[in-house]
Image (tube, rainbow, N blue to C red):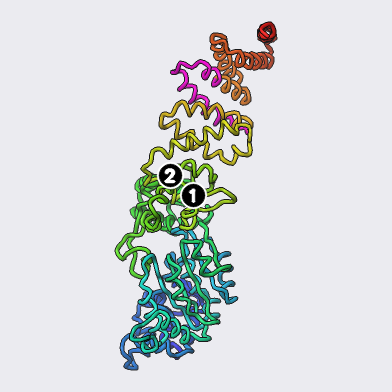
Amino acid sequence: MKPNLRLRHEREMRGWSQARVAEAIGSSEKNVSRWERGVSSPQPYYREKLCQLFGKSARELGFVEDELESGAPAGAGALARGRNHQERVIDPTIPPLPNEGRGLVGRTTLLGELVAQLCAGRSLALCGLPGVGKTALAVTLVHEARVLERFEAGVLWAGLGPRPNVLEHLHRWEQLLGVPAVATAASGEQSLEARARALRAAIGQRRFVLVIDDVWELEAALAFKVGGPQSVLIATTRFPRLALAIAGEGARTIHELESADGLALLAQWAPEVVAHDRRAALTLVEEVGGLPLALTLLGKYLQAQAHSGQPRRLQAALARLRSSHQRLHVSEMRGPLEQPPHLAWGTPLSLQSAIAVSDQQLDEQVREVLRALSVFPPKPNSFSEEAALAVAQAPPETLDALVDAGLLESSGTGRYLLHQTIADYASAHLRDPQAGERLVAYVTQLLERHGDDDAALELESRNIVAGLQYAFENGRHARFIRGVLAFTPFLRRRGFYELARLYLQRAYQIAIWSSDPLTQVRLLLGLGEVALHQGDLKAAGGYLREGLTLAREGGQRRELRRLLRLLRYLAARQDDAERAAAYGRELAALAAEEAAGD
C-alpha cells in the first residue's frame, strides 16, 4: 500500500492533529497514523466517518484510488488484498462499533483481560444473557490497537444465529483470502472439509482473528475453526456449554453492568434524565438489571421523548417505562450490518424479540417451567432447587435445560438466579395461575418447618415475602395468616419491626371478619410484642388488652399467660405498680388452677 497523501493533506489543510481526527471518529491516533502511512486501510465504518468529517468522498480521501484508477473490476480490491499476504484483510460484514463509536461503558478491566488473552495466542468464547453485550465486546476487541498490531493479517467475521448459512460465510472468507474456487471442489461439490483445508492453507502462518458471532450450534461453529497456529478465534454465544466446547478454559461469562456503569450508559443516550431525575434513572437501571441492550433501547427511547425540551413529556415516558410490558416492547429498527444474526431482516430489535428467540428453542415443558419460575423475585435474589421444583412441578432436568439455554443462572450448590429481564418476559407469558399458589404453599410449609432456623429463613426471606404478598393480593387469607404468624417471630428477632407490624396488621384486619378468636388473639399478641420492641407503649397496651379480653372469653390459657406477663412488664415500665400487681395475681391464680387440675 502507498501512503495516503490525500487523507493527510485534508487533515493538515484544516490544521488538525491526528489525535483530533481520531477523537472525532471514535478511533485511535495510532490508527490514523497507520492509514496515512499506508500501513493499513480503514474499514468501511471508519471510511464513512472520515468522509462525513471531511465532507469528501471515499475517492477524494484516497481510499479507492488504487482500485478505480488501476482499472480493476469492482470487488477485485478485496480479493487482491487477500492474495497479498502483506496487507490486512478486513471483513466488510464486521458490525459497526457499539454506542456509535464512543466505546463500551464499564468494560475497561474486562477488555484489558480479553486483549491480553488474545495477544497471548489464546482463543476465547464469550457467553451470557441475551443483550449483555457479547457482540459489542467482540467488535470492540477487533478494533483494539494491540489486537490489530498483534494480528496484522486481519479479521474474518461470521454472524451465525439459529439458522446459519455456513456455506455463504465460508465462500466470503474464500473470496477475501483469494482462495481459488477450484481449491474447494471435491468430486464436483464444494464440501465443508475441502473448504476448511483450503482456508487453513490460505491462512497458513499468518496472524488472523476469526470471529464467529451468535453461535447456536456446535457443528456450525466448528466449520469456522480454520485458523492456523498463529491465529485466534473469538466466539460469542448464549450457551455456556457451547462456550466451553469451543474455547475450553478460554470461555468467559459476561455479566450485566453494575448500577453506576448502567447509569453512565443510560446517560450517553438520555443525559437529561440522569441530570434532572437521577433517582428515576437509577430505578430504571435496576428494573432492567443493568442489561446493556435494555439500557441502550430505553435510552434511545427517552432521547426521542426529550427532544422537545418539555419535562412533562419526559416524565410521562419515564412513567410508562415503569411497566415491564412497556420495557419489553421498546424497539428499534437496525441496518443490515447492525441487525443481530438471530433476528430476520426487518424484525425490530427489542428485549421481547431478543429473548423470544431463546424461548422458542425450548421444548414445551421447559418453556412452562421458565414461566413458572417468574413468581420468584429476580436477581440478586436466589431460590433453591427444592423451591423451584415445588413451584414448577417438573423434574430437575428442566432446570438443567434452562441453565444450558443461558436463561437461568446457577448460584452455588442447589440455588438459582433469574435475571430481571428474563423474569419480566417469563411473567408476561405465564398462563398457569397455580404457580403462585404453589409458591404460597411452599413458603408456608417452609416457615412452619423451619421457623426457628434463622439462617434458612434469611436465605429465603425475599421468596417468603413474595409468597405472602401473592397470598394477600389474591385472597388466600388462611395461608396468609398462617405465614404471617410463622414469619413475624423471625422478623422480630432480626429487628424488622415495621415489616412485622405491617404483616400483622393486615392479617388482623382479615381475621376480625372470621369466627376464629384464637387467631385474633395470636395476632394481637404479635402486634403487642412488636410495639413493645419499637417503644410504642401506648399501642402495645391497646393490642395486649384487647387480646386479653378475647383470651379470657375464649379460655385460651396459653395465650392468656403470655398476655398477662407482657402486660405486667408493660405496667412496670409505665410505673403502674398497682396494675402490675393485679396482672401478677391473675397469673398466680391461673397457675394455681392448673396445678389443682393436675
Q: Quadrant of the C terminus?
A: top right
Provide residue 425's location: percent of width, then percent of height: 40, 49
Q: What is the chief secondary structure element of the magenta stretch?
A: helix
Q: Which residues are magenta?
A: 494-523
Indicate which disc, 2 or 1, sits on the residue closer to the N terminus: 2
How many residues crowd around disc 1 within 10 Å: few (fewer than 14), some, or many (20 or more)?
many
Which residue is identified by label 1? 418
Query: Mark 1 belongs to which amino acid?
Result: Leu
> Which of the 4 image quarters holds residue 269?
bottom left
The reply to whether residue 486 is visible in this rendering is yes
Is disc 1 placed on a helix, strand or loop?
loop
Which residue is identified by label 2? 372
Mark linked to residue 595 = none
The relative height of residue 27 versus residue 439 in the rendered view (above or below) is: below
The relative height of residue 320 versus residue 497 in the rendered view (above or below) is: below
How many residues crowd around disc 2 within 10 Å: few (fewer than 14), some, or many (20 or more)?
many
The residue that appears at 67% across and 13% down in the rendered structure is 568
The one of 296 and 424 positioned closer to us in this rendering: 424
* Residue 371 shown left or right of residue 74 in the figure: right
